[in-house]
Image (spheres, rainbow, N blue to C red):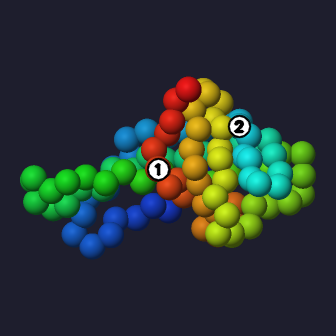
Amino acid sequence: MLNDLGIAGRGKQMTRVVETLKGEGTLVSSTAKNIVTYHLEVVEETGIAPMSPSLRTIAGCVAILYSDLELQPSLERFTLHLQDGGTLHVFCKRPGWIVATDGIRNH
């Protein structure tokens, strides 16, 4: 698939991919439940100073299976159920692209 999902450094920060999540899962909204494939990167951003706090962002692409539809930008929050059993709350920022609002929850 993609090696670089387009997550770029911002300002005077260093970024590094700490984990890549790929698989098949379920994307659930208030009105629908779709089987999807996902390719997400967990990116850690650190400030240039050694003691700067780090921030983790989880973002990437998602494709709805068994449909010609593409996930469209929305203010609605979705729940992505990952292949390993974890869940993420996400927003669709641009067609086929999601960003997590919090960390992965394991059940």
Residue labelled with disc 2: 25
Instruction: State which quadrant residue 68 falls in.
Output: bottom right
Q: Are marks 2 and 1 in contact (CB under 8 Å)?
A: no
Q: Give the side of residue 101 with respect to residue 74, left or right.
A: left
Mark 2: secondary structure: strand
Mark 1: secondary structure: loop
> Residue at image x 19%, y 60%?
47
Of 61 and 52, nearer the camera is 52
69 is higher (above) or lower (below) than 18: below
Alpha carbons under labels 2 and 1: distance apart: 18 Å
Of 9 and 42, nearer the camera is 42
Q: Give the side of residue 13 with respect to residue 77, left or right.
A: left
> Residue at image x 77%, y 54%?
30
Which kind of residue does numbered mark 1 sit on? Asp
Q: Residue furthest right?
A: 67
Classify 10 Å Cα crowding around label 2: few (below 14), some (14-19), many (20 and above).
many
Residue labelled with disc 1: 102
Whether residue 101 appears in this view of the structure is yes
Whether residue 4 appears in this view of the structure is no
Classify 10 Å Cα crowding around label 1: few (below 14), some (14-19), many (20 and above).
few
